[in-house]
Amino acid sequence: MPGIIGGAHVDGLQSLRVLQDVGELGREQVDFIGSEIEMRQRGDSLHVGTGETVGHGHDPSIVTVGNRMRERRLCAGSGTHVRSLGVPRSLFGRPRVEVEAALPDREPVDCPLCGREPRQFGVDFQGLQLARCRSCGLEFQHPRPVFEQLADAIYTSDYHPAGHEAVDRDRERTFARQMERIERYVRRRPAALLDVGCGAGAFLGYARGRGWEAGGTDISVTEAARRHEARLWQGQLPDIDFDGARFEAVRLNHVLEHTQDPLRELCQVRRIVADDGVLLIGVPNIAGLSIRLKSWQSRLGLKRRCWKHYGALHHLWFFTPLTLAALVHAAGFTVAHWETPTEARPRRYGWMRALVGRPLEAARMGGILDLYARPR
Ligand SMILES: [Zn+2]
């Protein structure tokens, strides 16, 4: 039977193992095997099967949930939140057979701009299929894994690794670059900013520090994000009811390439962004020089893991400055500015950045595409 623990949906549940904290005695293991497992949240505790209670008071317990795909560990901490500790082994870099076992169902996708069926141009090392629209050139996965299986296999609440809320020098440089540009368009304070796909909330904290009223959305809102005093919404952006809320700035940084339908996302942004506001989209730039070289290597069969640089396990869409501008325009925006920063590298590669990165940025061939657009 399907069960729901906290925000985690568990299909095909067959067994449940509870490692219950029993103070100084350590952990005691309780196994529940069979199809008649019942779990329900009551008050601040999680009730399991035969009336056992875990996760109340201050004793955190580990709950292992086994389903037909794999085991998943869930931690029932104190209070009502039950936090997923994640899938033991990530699918990233795993062989094709494992990916197909975890993501067995595929769905066809037409170009959101033209409504046309695209033409396949490659299959990556994990068996994921890459296609390009014959009319506008937009690239995306087709057919692609279905959302429910992706969400279950990839977007668990540990997708944002521990420590991701920390802001190192490279991230701070990215935040500052993006915020300085946003603030050229929106000068007044206080003003509202929405960070779509806010993850661990690092940017929410940064924006608050610069006087913004920050809010965020994510498919799975993390505990780390909750620690920022920000308004948070859970779910896919087009499905969220913002109840009339408007934002002077909306940021989708490395989000759009993960969404089900980027045009639907941007149309929702158009509804919630203030008329004098600004939209920032950051995505990988597949027209960047390094990505182009790797694509040619993949086409010629020179790469052991072909098309790995597309990141198709979690990226469903692949943008160039041209195709992203076409999408933004179709959603009711005009492009105000775009640039192609080179990827943040550890500081010891600073000379490399000066030698290679700067000329690439000047030629607009960097690996990242940051595009700023305003409602029209
Ligand atoms: Zn198209």
Image (cartoon, grey):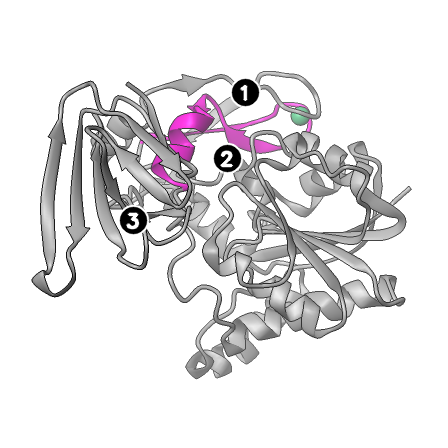
Number of marks present in the image shown: 3
What's the residue at 64%, 34% (across, down)?
Answer: 262
Mark 2–mark 1 CB contact (< 8 Å): yes
Above or below: residue 221 compared with residue 176: above
Range drawn in magenta:
127-155
Above or below: residue 32 compared with residue 20: above
**SS for tag 2?**
loop
Identified by mark 1, the residue type is Val
- Mark 1 = which residue? 109
| First of labels 3, 1 by sequence position | 3
Where residue 152 appears, x then y in whole percent?
37, 33
Can residue 123 be seen here? The reply is no
Mark 3–mark 2 CB contact (< 8 Å): no
Between 70 and 374, which is closer to the camera in this rendering?
Answer: 70
- Mark 2 = which residue? 316
**SS for tag 1?**
loop
Disc number lying in front (3 or 1):
3
Is residue 195 part of the magenta span, yes or no? Answer: no
Disc number lying in front (3 or 2):
3
- Where does ligand 1 appear, by image quarter? top right
Where residue 306 appears, x then y in whole percent?
34, 41
Q: Which mark is residue 55?
A: 3
CA gap between label 3 and label 1 equals 43 Å
The picture quadrant where one finds residue 191 is bottom right
Where residue 357 appears, x then y in whole percent?
56, 71
**SS for tag 3?**
loop
